[in-house]
């Protein structure tokens, strides 16, 4: 079951890695406009901060769509047939993959925004970490916020149990931590 879960959401993992690498490019830096436009709320704090950008928002949707299309082609081989929960519910076509990939990408980025909003309210700077209980809670939520949205989209098409839903969240969080460690080791990320 765990292998099948990874097979199902591999495009999201791949797109997340590609998007993180993309944020280090000159193209990203050139068109890096914050979603909140740099405006502050009445409390004097930013809505989301500098790290939530329009180019990052749309690039994640595009990368997830492309990854889903490519992964759909890979999943058409015999060994993968039936192992991808998504294709037990919908037909593995380019159009379906484009649509589902876009939804996964959209859910991924939308579910990161509330976390950024809350962190700005409690004075955690974009891309920074804090210590103590607040730091642990924020760190854990940073690892699962996007996978919650992706798993909710998966719930719309696939009949998954509450146990599977929670397992997706747990595995997504663990995978996020491992990927972050690798990207940190490669100096693509500034923190874990």
Image: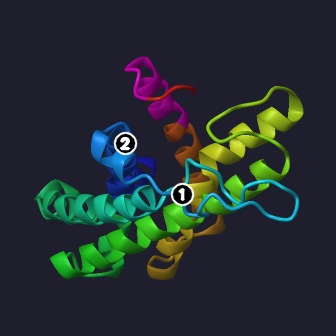
Give above or below for 147 relative to 95. Answer: above
Q: Position of residue 94 (x, y in %)?
A: 17, 76
Q: Position of residue 157 (x, y in %)?
A: 44, 80
Query: Which region is colored magenta?
Result: 177-188
Foreground residue among 41 and 163: 41
Judged from the image, the secondary structure of the residue bearing numbered disc 2 is helix
Give above or below for 86 relative to 39. Answer: below
Q: Residue at position x 32%, y 45% from top?
A: 18
Q: Position of residue 38 (x, y in %)?
A: 63, 57
Quadrant placement of the C terminus: top right
Q: Residue at position x 25%, y 58% from top?
A: 67
Q: On the rendered structure, is 192 left or right of 92?
A: right
| Residue 92 visible in image | yes
Q: On the rendered structure, is 45 left or right of 24?
A: right
Q: Upstream in the sequence, badge 1 or badge 2?
A: 2
Marks 1/2: CA distance? 21 Å
Mark whose residue sits in front, 1 or 2: 1
Pointer 2 residue: 17
Q: Residue at position x 38%, y 44% from top?
A: 29
Pointer 1 residue: 34
Foreground residue among 69 and 91: 69
Give above or below for 48 relative to 22. Answer: below
């Amino acid at each position: 079951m765990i292998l099948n879960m990874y097979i199902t959401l591999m495009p999201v993992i791949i797109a997340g890695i590609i998007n993180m690498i993309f944020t280090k490019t000159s193209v990203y830096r050139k068109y890096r406009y914050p979603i909140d436009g740099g405006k502050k709320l009445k409390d004097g704090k930013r809505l989301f901060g500098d790290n939530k950008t329009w180019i990052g928002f749309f690039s994640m949707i595009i990368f997830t769509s492309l990854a889903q299309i490519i992964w759909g082609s890979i999943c058409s081989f015999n060994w993968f047939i039936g192992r991808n929960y998504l294709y037990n519910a919908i037909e593995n076509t380019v159009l379906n993959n484009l649509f589902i990939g876009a939804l996964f990408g959209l859910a991924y980025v939308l579910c990161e925004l509330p976390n950024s909003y809350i962190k700005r309210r409690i004075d955690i700077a974009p891309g920074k970490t804090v210590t103590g209980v607040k730091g642990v809670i924020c760190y854990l939520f940073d690892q699962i916020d996007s996978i919650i949205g992706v798993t909710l989209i998966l719930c719309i098409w696939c009949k998954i149990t509450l146990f599977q839903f929670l397992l997706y969240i747990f595995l997504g969080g663990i995978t996020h931590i491992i990927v972050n460690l690798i990207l940190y080791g490669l100096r693509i990320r500034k923190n874990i």
